[in-house]
């Protein structure tokens, strides 16, 4: 901040003579005058090479026509210095006709010609480069270097490398230019020691863990990737836990964001999932509505057969198509779903299978963008969950041109 102090002294006590007065000959230089209360007639920037004048002037609050005060100058010096682009900032004052002119003289920090990461093995350089806030062909900014170090460290923590070290190096290459290198020491990965659940009174731990991607390290974890901690995977497992409960009929289940704890020696991770199970439901009434097309066999009766787990009937003659001289049922490739029977335990996978088969029913009649929404509506008083399917058939589409690619030695025909 020595430059700021010198600038403040210059602002209060100095009126620069003709040799420093920009654009004013010695004949026009005036005798020293008090800065306090003077009217500003011009504001200029000097000494900048990489940072444009407009960028510096944007940080200056003093404008032509204003009455000058020491507080105004101090504020502008702090604003310019706070950008982090300058080693020193000085304000020079000279008398001009009708007031004073201000010259903000800056000394820029070195220009960055290259930025790179070295020493990384477990995370791709491309993924780390995206986090770098220091840009080539810009001016070195220590604040952005510090921000980049934190972003890189956070990335390694996210992937389980809690012991990773990031060290920056500013390497001069001549002509007031530098290279910025972030040296990475990854160290060993922190492993998952324990995955725990709180509130799972009716679904045992082993049944939930079976479907999770996050695994406990167990015996000799260094021989395999088992137990590897990844924050993204742990957060995705929150949805997995919820799905397991939906499959068991707990429609109202709530799974909080998992909490992750690091052991004092930074060798192990402990992950905890808090669950509010709610009530277990059986299937109540199953209804379907939306876009039916009677003449094409897309009727509520046909949809009910799918919901009940029956194959689709041959409603009309046009339910058959001819391929290679053979009659083929249009819906023959449809998967048969388990029936959504009244007072069976609700299973999310069965509801989704029925929804997908309903969507195929409309798709096989040319409604390629048909959308079927399944909405479970639980009733805590009865312990039943009603399921409502809503069909939006969209527009009907026809096959246009058929293109084949990659068959260089063979003709399309």
Image: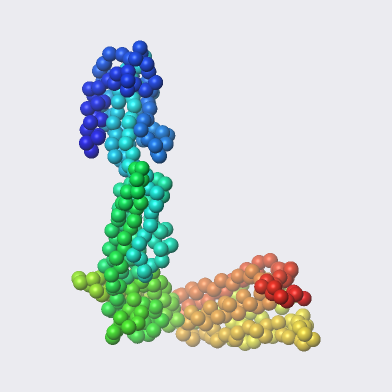
x and y percentages locating residue 164 in the rendered image: 29, 66
In the picture, which quadrant includes the N terminus? top left
x and y percentages locating residue 222 in the rendered image: 30, 81
Q: Nearer the viewer, residue 357 or 140?
A: 140
At horizontal 55% and vertical 80% (from top left) the residue drawn is 353
Instruction: In the rendered view, tell whether residue 358 sits above or below residue 27.
Output: below
x and y percentages locating residue 119 in the rendered image: 34, 65
Instruction: In the rendered view, tell whether residue 110 sits above or below residue 257.
Output: above
Can the viewer see residue 112?
yes
At horizontal 23% and vertical 31% (from top left) the residue drawn is 6
Q: Is residue 10 left or right of residue 21?
A: left
At horizontal 33% and vertical 58% (from top left) the residue drawn is 182
At horizontal 39% and vertical 32% (from top left) the residue drawn is 57
Q: Nearer the viewer, residue 243 or 400?
A: 400
In the picture, which quadrant includes the C terminus? bottom right
Q: Nearer the viewer, residue 249 or 46?
A: 46
Can the viewer see residue 280?
no
How did the renderer colour the structure?
rainbow
Instruction: In the rendered view, tell whether residue 351 sits above or below residue 167.
Output: below
Toward which corner of the image does residue 357 lie, by quadrant? Answer: bottom right
x and y percentages locating residue 17 in the rendered image: 29, 18
């Amino acid at each position: 901040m020595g430059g700021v102090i010198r600038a403040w002294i210059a602002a209060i006590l100095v009126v620069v003579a003709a040799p420093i007065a920009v654009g004013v000959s010695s004949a026009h230089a005036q005798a020293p005058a008090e800065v306090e209360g003077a009217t500003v007639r011009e504001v200029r920037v000097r000494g900048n090479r990489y940072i444009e004048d407009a960028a510096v002037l944007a940080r200056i609050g003093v404008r032509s026509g204003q009455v000058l005060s020491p507080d105004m100058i101090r504020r502008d010096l702090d604003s310019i210095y706070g950008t982090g682009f300058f080693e020193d900032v000085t304000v020079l004052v000279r008398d001009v006709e009708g007031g004073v002119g201000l010259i903000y003289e800056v000394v820029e920090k070195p220009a960055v010609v290259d930025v790179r990461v070295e020493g990384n093995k477990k995370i791709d350089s491309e993924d780390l480069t995206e986090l770098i806030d220091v840009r080539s062909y810009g001016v070195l900014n220590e604040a952005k270097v510090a921000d980049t170090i934190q972003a890189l460290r956070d990335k390694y923590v996210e992937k389980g490398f809690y012991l990773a070290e990031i060290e920056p190096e500013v390497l001069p290459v001549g002509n007031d230019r530098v290279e910025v290198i972030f040296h990475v020491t990854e160290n060993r990965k922190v492993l998952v020691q324990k995955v725990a659940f709180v509130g799972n009174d009716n679904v045992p731990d082993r049944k939930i863990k079976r479907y999770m991607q996050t695994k406990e390290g167990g015996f000799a974890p260094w021989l395999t990737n088992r137990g590897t901690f990844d924050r993204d995977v742990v957060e995705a497992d929150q949805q997995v836990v919820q799905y397991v409960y939906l499959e068991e009929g707990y429609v109202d289940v709530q799974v909080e964001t998992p909490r992750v704890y690091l052991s004092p020696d930074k060798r192990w991770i402990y992950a905890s999932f808090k669950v509010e199970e709610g009530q277990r439901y059986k299937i109540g009434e199953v209804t379907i509505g939306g876009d039916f097309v009677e003449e094409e066999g897309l009727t509520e009766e046909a949809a009910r057969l799918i919901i009940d787990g029956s194959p689709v009937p041959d409603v009309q003659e046009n339910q058959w198509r001819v391929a290679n001289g053979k009659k083929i049922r249009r819906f023959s490739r449809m998967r048969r779903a388990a029936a959504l029977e009244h007072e069976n335990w609700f299973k999310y996978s069965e509801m989704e299978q029925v929804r997908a088969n309903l969507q195929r029913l409309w798709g096989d009649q040319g409604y390629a963008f048909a959308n079927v929404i399944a909405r479970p509506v639980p009733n805590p008083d009865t312990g039943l969950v009603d399921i409502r399917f809503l069909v939006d058939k969209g527009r009907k589409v026809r096959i246009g041109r058929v293109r084949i690619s990659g068959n260089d030695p063979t003709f399309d025909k």
